Amino acid sequence: MFPTQSLGYDRAITVFSPEGRLYQVEYATEAVRHGPLAVGVKATDGVVLVGEKRSPHPLVDLTTLKKLLLIDDHVGTAIAGLHADARKLIDQARVHAQINRLSYDEPVSIQSLVVNVCDTKQLHTQYGGVRPFGVALLVAGVDDLGPQLFSTDPSGSYWGWKATAIGKDSDVVREFFAEKYKPGIDIDGALKLAIEGVLTPGSDKTVSDPAEKAKTIEIGRVDTTKRAFKILPQDEVEVILATFA
């Protein structure tokens, strides 16, 4: 993917190639593309996140691996890429959310939270002695503007989405969403579409055994009624996946 000629321009993050590319940012993006899949779907009354967990070794306890994490009561995130990098950004986002509550006595807006994270990501593409964060985040929540779904990438760019995916096979899943997503979808339909998206990329992603599959899938949702992001326990995930068996 990266030609030999690029080697002279990827020694430092501050060096542009003659084509105007920052190769270190592209390398960080590759780290995201090799991470386990995460998808998000926005509905009229909420947002759903679904993420896959992939064990690095057969002896790893999958319950200790987290694909979805809470940032504040009303907002959560899904990770694709380097989890160590994600921890730093999520800790920063949590602090920003709490500062907003203390300063203004109200929950932080989702876009403000995303901009704060992306400002940090962008700084790590601009200065020597640092490297880009090799992680992408899906940020989902409900604020005064209604349901919100954003993605961030290693360059510090962000986009709002109706439905999207990050990580391995994300291009395939986005094409699937482009075909299947319907305006006016409710949160239950969004959950069904999100799980179908996770199961779409390969024939090996089946639900022959919902109990086992539930160990590798995490589901989070937030609706406009309660405005509380909830990561579903494994037994609830198993019940949902049983309908796809």
Image (spheres, rainbow, N blue to C red):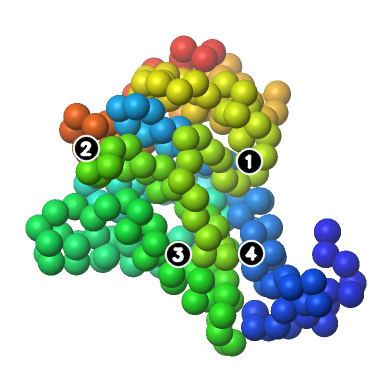
The residue at the point 89 percent across, 75 percent down is 5
| Residue 219 visible in the snapshot | no
Write the residue at 65% across / 44% down.
168
Residue drawn 19% across the image and 29% down it: 225
Instruction: Name the spot of residue 169 as percent of width and height, x first.
Output: 67, 39
* Quarter of image, res 93: bottom left
- Front-most of 245 and 150? 150
**Label 4 sits on residue:** 28
N-term-proximal mark, 4 vs 3: 4
Q: CA distance from mark 3 to mark 2?
A: 24 Å
Mark 3: amino acid:
Cys
The residue tagged 3 is 118
Q: Earlier in the sequence, mark 1 or mark 2?
A: 1
The residues tagged by marks 4 and 3 sit, at their Cα atoms, a distance apart of: 14 Å
Q: Quadrant of the C terminus?
A: top right
The amino acid type found where label 1 is placed reads Ser
Residues under numbered marks 1 and 4 in contact, where contact means CB atoms less than 8 Å apart? no
**Mark 4 neighbour density, 10 Å: few (under 14) some (14–19) many (20 or more):** many
Element class at badge 4? helix
- Quadrant for residue 47, please give it: top left
- Callout 3: SS: helix
**Residue, disc 2:** 227
